[in-house]
Amino acid sequence: MTQQVPSSAGVPAKTETYDSRYEALDLWPTGTLLDALLESQLGAVASVKAALPGMEEAITAALPRLQRGGRLFYVGAGTSGRIGLQDGVELIPTYGWPEERLVLLLAGGDAALFQPVEGAEDDEEAARTAITTHKAGPDDVVIGVAASGGTPYTCAALTCARAAGSLTIGLSCSPNTRLLQDAELGLLIETGPEVVAGSTRMKAGTAQKVALNMLSTALMVRLGHTWRGQMVDMKIVNAKLVRRAHRMVQQLTDCTEAEAKDALEKAEGSIKLAVLVCFGFAPAEGRALLKQHAGNLRTVLKNR
């Protein structure tokens, strides 16, 4: 992939620039203000389309590493970091992604989840220490997110991980940035100036969330964590999800509610295994087949 050249020192990132169209923003009628904010959000979503070829390349490069047991790292600072953490942590209940294969690095640590930590995003040494401590390696996939594309913590983490052989993916909302250069695969999602200048939790934040949701969802689908559009590796952790699991097994196997409940009990809460039980497999046989086929339910059923 063609890499971007970092912008000149002292030149603000495109996400930080001022748009004179919004100079009288505080004087506008509330309805007009809301229209402008919605328009900017829709534009942010549309901006992701230009990055689709790069996202496809990133998914293709990441898959074999994750299939070999590699980990997913999310790295960022401030709003970008929190958006990354949200995307990553939701993979655990939604797709059954193993906790030990997820590394979430936020500049400033846990304290930065709820309030800014002074100087954290500029601490390159802390980023290198975090990557080294977690022993990033060739099978790991490290995703760095920065609206400006120049956050020192995020850039340093990707540089360190890349030197260790990890696949590094940099997501920037500004062109010609250090992050796009430092990452092996740079994804530019150009959102431009914000309605409120520099408030990148808005357009840039929306675009980042959309892009990360797409990347991680596509990876989970390709890794076999879904079947027929259903979350068959979902963790059943509350009453709502118990009911959802019952519905899923019924829809996927055309069994009765009672049969779905019985299958899930025999499968110890594994939806994939419950599906196989409903199709006549003994639980032990189903477990063995899922293990043999890397947990891919479609492959198991195709070869039965």
Image (cartoon, rainbow, N blue to C red):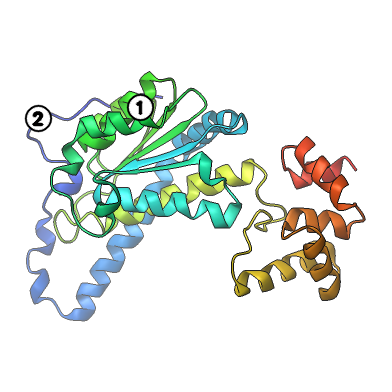
Q: Which residue is drawn at 15% across and 48% down?
A: 16
Mark sitting on residue 189: none
Image quadrant holding the N terminus, namely: top left
Q: Mark 2 points at which residue?
A: 9
- Against 13, is 6 above or below? above
- Against 158, is 222 above or below? below
Counting the numbered discs, the total is: 2
Residue closest to the eye, 179 or 238: 238
Query: In the rendered view, does 35 fall on the left or right side of 238?
Result: left
* Callouts 1 and 2 close, C-beta under 8 Å: no
Q: Name the residue under label 1.
A: 132
Front tag of 1 and 2: 1
| Residue 247 pos. (x, y %) | 73, 70
Looking at the rendered structure, the secondary structure element under dot 2 is: loop
Question: Which amino acid, mark 2?
Answer: Ala
- Report the residue that reaches farthest toward the right: 280
- Separation of disc 1 and disc 2 at Cα? 28 Å
Q: Residue at x 12, y 28 (%)?
A: 8
Q: Residue at x 79, y 64 (%)?
A: 265
Question: Which amino acid, mark 1?
Answer: Thr
